[in-house]
Each structure stands twice: as structure tokens, then as C-alpha cells.
Amino acid sequence: MSLADKPAPPRDSLEAGGEYRLHEQVGFVLRKANQRHLSIFAAHVGDLTPPQFAALARLHEVGETSQNQLGQLIAMDAATIKGVIDRLKKRGLVTLKPHALDRRRLVVGLSDEGRVLVERLLPVAMRITAETLKPLNAREAEIFLKLLGKIADG
């Protein structure tokens, strides 16, 4: 019986001091699922990290935005997004310029090369998602994503 086939322990049994089993813990299962997804991602998109791709994909969706706003849009703190943007800038995939009204802020946008790359990768990303969710049927995948969203949004 695989982990996916094992029923989750009843919530009240855990609250009542039930036995701790690592393979039944949400963090452990999420980490294993994430490792599987990262492996699939790396096999299809070897030259970008998932955070770099997320930054490019979100810039493609929203257009130019401040570096801090981009970080918020892809759930990264200011220090992390700065490193991601610096590496994308070094590769010529994004542009940086001072904000028109606030020179302390930087505006990030896709370069022409970045736009071409992200437009080529978006269909690949959809296939990566499909491959990650392949063990689930369509209804299970829909429910799974909805439930993960609820957990992520707290």
C-alpha cells in the first residue's frame, strides 16, 4: 500500500495523543510532493529555478512592476526577490529602471529575450503541472489545488 492509499489519521485521534507517524504528517508529505515536482521541473526547464520562472511568468502576466511588488506577487521576501532579480538581470532576461515617482524603488520588466523565453516556457510549465498531477484524476486535481490554496492562504 502506497502513502497515497493510506487513509489520513482521524483529526481527533491526533488531538487525543495518537501515535506520531512521520509519513502521515502534512509537512513530510508536502516536501515529498514538492521534491517530485521539482524533479519534473528540472527535467523540463534545466536552466531556470522555479523562483526565477515564477518571476518571469508573473512579469509576463502583470507587466512592469516594482521589485517589492513582484516579490509579494510570487510570495518572496524582499531579500529573496532581490537575489532572483539580480540573477535574471545578469542573464539579460529582465530590465531594471528607477521608478518614475520614487527613485528609491526599482521597476522590473521583461527584456525582449525574457519575453521570448517565458512565452516558450509557458506551455512547458503547463505540461509540468499536468505531469506533477498525473497520479490524480481531473476532479481530484481540482480538489487538491483548491485545498492547497486554502492551506497556503491560511
Image (spheres, rainbow, N blue to C red):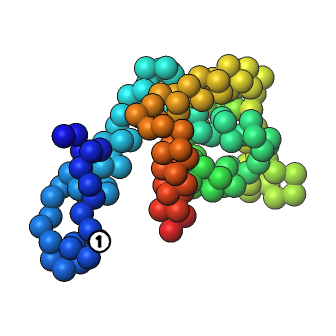
Left or right: 71 with respect to 113? left
- Picture quarter containing residue 54? top right
Residue 86 in the image, given as x and y percentages of width and height: 59, 37
Residue that lies at the very extreme toward the bottom in this rendered image: 16
Left or right: 148 with respect to 3? right
- Picture quarter containing residue 113? top right
Q: Nearer the viewer, residue 129 or 91?
A: 129
**Residue at 58% over, 33% down:** 53
**Relative height, residue 12 to residue 135 (above, below):** below
Q: Nearer the viewer, residue 14 or 49?
A: 14
Mark 1 falls on what kind of element?
helix
Left or right: 96 with respect to 147? right
Residue 41 in the image, given as x and y percentages of width and height: 46, 28
| Label 1 Cα crowd, 10 Å radius (few <14 / some 14-19 / many 20+) | few
Which image quadrant: the N terminus? top left
Residue 87 in the image, given as x and y percentages of width and height: 56, 33
Return the residue at label 1: 11
Q: Is residue 131 visible?
A: yes
Residue 97 in the image, given as x and y percentages of width and height: 78, 41
**Residue at 64% over, 31% down:** 89
Q: Is residue 51 visible?
A: no
**Residue at 22% over, 72% down:** 14
Identified by mark 1, the residue type is Arg
Q: Nearer the viewer, residue 139 or 146?
A: 139
Residue that lies at the very extreme toward the left in this rendered image: 19
Residue that lies at the very extreme toward the right in this rendered image: 100
Q: How many marks?
A: 1
